[in-house]
Image (tube, rainbow, N blue to C red):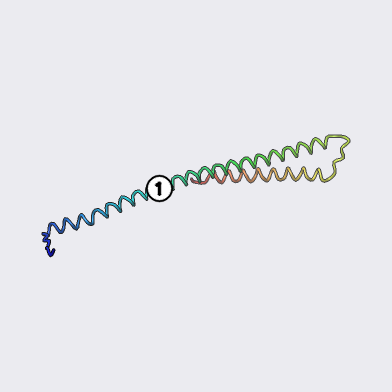
Amino acid sequence: MDEVVVLSIPQIIITFVAAMGIPSALTSYMLSRHEKRLEKRDEQREKERAKKEKDMDTHQKLLLETINASLALGEATARAVQRIPDAKCNVDMHAALEYAQKVKHEQKDFLREQALENLHEVP
């Protein structure tokens, strides 16, 4: 049982290199797989973020159009009521109509200003 194994220096070097190479290769392989998974997850998250951003833009546009439609309907109703000879439009109706027109113009001015700023913005 007391046998002694004698290895030459080249055998020791080959054994050492093999012993160190196999774990290194496995570790490298596992790290590359992990990096690929992370990249795939990041790409998926970027796609989801872009879709959410596009959906939010669409939602904001629809909200703005809804507000404009409501304002137009309110203005049309107020003007129609003003034309009725028997309807007695009080000061509140005239004030509300003027306020609606003022807000509509402020909104248009703001959107125009934003459009100009975004035209000059470098992507």
Residue furthest toward the front? 1
Quarter of the image for residue 19 reads: bottom left
Q: Residue at x 37, y 47 (%)?
A: 36
Residue 15 higher or lower than 123, as above or below: below
Residue 49 higher or lower than 72, as above or below: below
The residue nearer to you, when weighing 1 against 78, is 1
The residue nearer to you, when weighing 22 against 90, is 22
Q: Residue at x 67, y 40 (%)?
A: 66
Q: Is 59 positioned to the left or the right of 104 in the image? A: left
Amino acid type, label 1: Glu
The residue nearer to you, when weighing 3 against 26, is 3
Residue 69: percent from left, percent from top: 69, 38
Residue 38: percent from left, percent from top: 40, 49
Residue 54: percent from left, percent from top: 54, 42
Q: According to the image, label 1 marks what residue?
A: 39
Quarter of the image for residue 58 reads: top right
Residue 84: percent from left, percent from top: 85, 34
Numbered label tally: 1
Q: Is 6 positioned to the left or the right of 32 in the image? A: left
Quarter of the image for residue 87 reads: top right
Local secondary structure at mark 1: helix
Q: Is 87 positioned to the left or the right of 34 in the image? A: right
